[in-house]
Image (cartoon, rainbow, N blue to C red):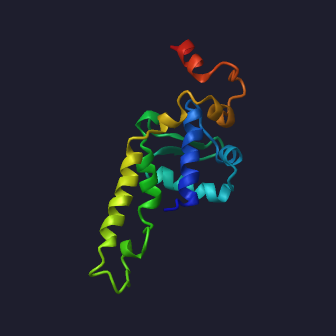
Amino acid sequence: MRLTTRTNLALRTLMVCAVNPDRIVRKSDVATLINASENHLAQVVNQLGQAGFINTLRGRHGGFSLAHPAADISVGAVFRAFEADLPLIECFSADNTCPLKEVCRMAGHLRAAVDAFYSSLDAVRLGDLVDCNDGLEALLSLDPRINLQAPACSRLREVA
């Protein structure tokens, strides 16, 4: 199984938003941080917005931010939003022309494998990927004032 570039960019985009929770993130900033073209990223941002993962704001001071707390966003749901319409193999396609389709037993096993893949990701939350991840925060933070010398978990304790 191979994930699409869009799914990869979607997860990276959500990570940028999660690391910068108190600000509107601009597409150009995300493109620079995650090494993506703005045109490709625009399509991903549009799909993330339509799926309800982010809130978008148009205009001069526009951008986007998470629509829900990172702890509530399932990685499995993100992957399904971007991958569900793409059949893994011809068996899963509406226009399946395989001559074996009526008698083949492999399709059921492949469906179970794909379901297990998504199920294993359902338990993973965006927050699990970013919380107390100092390296990720150092790479994706848009706030130059953040003291990255102190570990993120220490900064969280200081705020509480």
Q: Which of the two residues, 92 or 7, is positioned nearer the viewer here?
A: 92
Q: Which of the two residues, 141 or 121, is positioned nearer the viewer here?
A: 121
61 relative position to 94: left or right? right
102 relative position to 139: left or right? left
Residue located 58% across and 59% down the image: 5
Residue sitting at the far bottom: 99
Is residue 145 in view from this perspective? yes
Asked if 47 appears above or below 25 in the picture, the reply is: below
Is residue 52 in view from this perspective? no
Position of residue 19 measured from the top left corner of the image (x, y, whole percent): 58, 33
Asked if 108 appears above or below 136 in the picture, the reply is: below
Residue located 54% across and 61% down the image: 4
Q: Which of the two residues, 112 or 138, is positioned nearer the viewer here?
A: 112
**Image quarter for residue 84?**
bottom left
Position of residue 67 measured from the top left corner of the image (x, y, whole percent): 46, 40
Q: Which of the two residues, 121 or 146, is positioned nearer the viewer here?
A: 121
Position of residue 95 measured from the top left corner of the image (x, y, whole percent): 38, 80
Asked if 56 appears above or below 69 in the picture, the reply is: below
Residue sitting at the far left: 103
**Image quarter for residue 156?**
top right
Position of residue 97 measured from the top left corner of the image (x, y, whole percent): 38, 85
